[in-house]
Amino acid sequence: MNRKHFLSAVIPLGAVLQAAGGTTKEEPYLAKIPPYLKKGDTIGITCPAGFITLEDIQPAVTKLKEWGFEVKIGSTVGKKDFTFGGTDEERLQDMQQMLDDRQVKAVMCARGGYGAIHIIDQVDFKKFVQKPKWIIGFSDVTVIHSHLNKNFGIASIHSKMCNSFPSDWSKAEPVQIETIESIQKCLLGQQMTYTALPNEKNKTGIAEGILTGGNLKTLETLAGSKSDINTDGKILFVEDTGEYLYSIDRMFWNLKRSGKLNKLKALVVGGFKVKPAEDPADEFGKNLYEIVLSITKEFNYPVCFDFPVGHQKNNFALKCGVKHQLTVTATTTTLIEIK
Amino acid sequence: MIKIPPYLKKGNTIGITCPAGYMAKEKAQTCIDVLQQWGYQVMVGKTLGSDSQNYFSATDEDRRDELQAMLDDKNIHAILCGRGGYGVGRIIDDLDFRTFKKNPKWIIGFSDITVLHSHIYSNIKIATLHAPMAAAFNDGGYENEFIQSLKKAIAGKKASYKAAVHPFNKTGIATGELVGGNLSLLAHLTGTTSDINTKNKILFIEDIGEYIYNIDRMMHQLKRSGKLDKLAGLIIGGFTDMKDTERPFGKKVYEVINDILAGYKYPVCFDFPVSHGTTNYALKVGGTYSLKIDKTNVRLMEVQ
């Protein structure tokens, strides 16, 4: 063996060992997992972003009670300040109350929309950090997932929210039932496994790492802020809806240029509902697969497409901040929580 | 210290390239004619009116190569971007600015060209020109004061712009280097190597065609990434063709911006003529300006 080569191989090993010792504050080796729920525990419902009526959360309330949980409905449900579920002050207070209330063992965001960014810096996480609980939601709630991951290393659940619970369970499609029941499984602490259909565009491989991610646009707008995630050594998942292809391309460039794609263990691409160009002459000319494969071509880690996460019925509950193993082969994609 | 490229003299050559979206050559013809009437020679790149069949004016490699060639060519004294669109972010890290740094020249454009302005300001420390591009010359546009401001800027005439007062303005005087451009791009560049430091600067922003909630979100990104804290002054340009969601956001775009600025004491002016509309004065990114806002006047003057 070439001596110089040998030496260069030794140095990074030492660096890895040091990182594994958990000395860095912002990147704990293992995330803090909030206690899982038991029957009889209380789940709080709050609106950190968009508004929702009391009526529209009833299907979720009914189902959570069927699962054996108590439900505490926050003061923001039914409140409306234009697009928001109450004023910033009202949403902040409700979230704060849910975080601090010891009876509440998990907090489900009623819906996304827009607005979590208005309150995140005012939320006092002191009690929450001492006694973590599960925060549940996706889309705009990516702000909260990212903030918890970056600042406290506390796991949270990226999943459907109250507005996705069907009002008539008997008419729900199997995938709706399965994805909503995946929230229950997460909350009860069952080991999660997910499968995705094979896709010939996938880059195969096996990877292990903490799962992090969420809505791509939201991740981009968190760049440079104190809620900006560190993706080194992690499995990153992204999804989005209603964006132009050029904008999706630009967001992936933001990930790349802010160093978020360089040291991934794997990239999981969920659903992307693409908005067509207003003027056909402005058609981007590259599809999602081409955009992602082009931007990740220099990286060897596995990449999978069409993973069941996103603004769609096929949106399974994922534990952000928890270690997972992703296996992408020509015939299957599986994601397994590592206990 | 930011270096100011040499101003143009009659007979100098302006190169036109399209580093981002596609542009038909006819749409740049008036611009070419007018630049020649101003006494300059014009070198047109192959990316203008190319045979590209997609969104971009050419492949990433061809767009980069052409811009690189124009940056390095000593016989080109300024580079006017034909149009913006989207695409500079895909090539910016592959450009070599070493020759340009030794022999700076004016790079002109706005919108997606904000990537070049920010990157060059932060990394190469050369002033650039945020100004109308080729299409703005059409339909007699070359006669308006905004295209004329570009003509004066490249010839080295110091700018002194007036703007109408706005009820949200915060009065005061600020002096500092001018930085900024398109808000979407500034937000998008946050956390990258092209990100700008806005401390003690006069920041200007403008945007087009965004949802109001998204403007709000981007303003929060600027705030949360520390870009609004220590400004010398802030210039809010045009926010044209704003869209609202089905459930209305409940505020107009300037109200959104004004609300986020509550608590900051530096001078701010609204509706300054820098925008995707006609009203778009040439501004030197990296140039030092004095911004004076009082109850009856808004004035932005070049200091040196």
Image: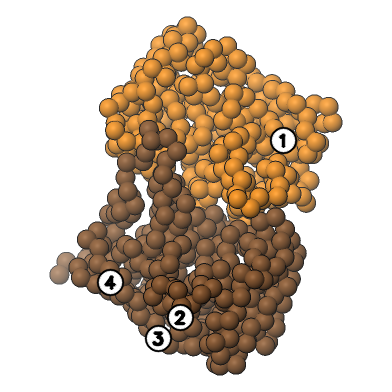
Chain colours: A brown, B orange
Q: Which residue is mark 1?
A: B270
Query: Mark 3 belongs to which amino acid?
Result: Gln
Residue B174 x %, y %: 74, 36
Q: Which residue is mark 4?
A: A333
Residue at x 54%, y 82% (from the top left corner): A63
Label 2 element class: helix
Mark 2 vs mark 1, CA separation in Å: 50 Å
Q: Subunit of mark 3?
A: A
Say if A250 sits above or below A107 in the image.
above
Mark 3 vs mark 2, CA separation in Å: 13 Å
Mark 4 vs mark 2, CA separation in Å: 21 Å
Label 1 element class: loop
Q: Are marks 3 and 2 on the same chain?
A: yes
Residue B125 x %, y %: 51, 36
Dot label at residue A191: 3
Q: Subunit of mark 4?
A: A
Query: Does A161 sit left or right of B51 as displayed?
Result: right
Query: Does A114 sit left or right of A10 as displayed?
Result: right
Mark 4 vs mark 3, CA separation in Å: 17 Å
Label 4 element class: strand
Residue B55 x %, y %: 36, 36
Label 3 element class: loop
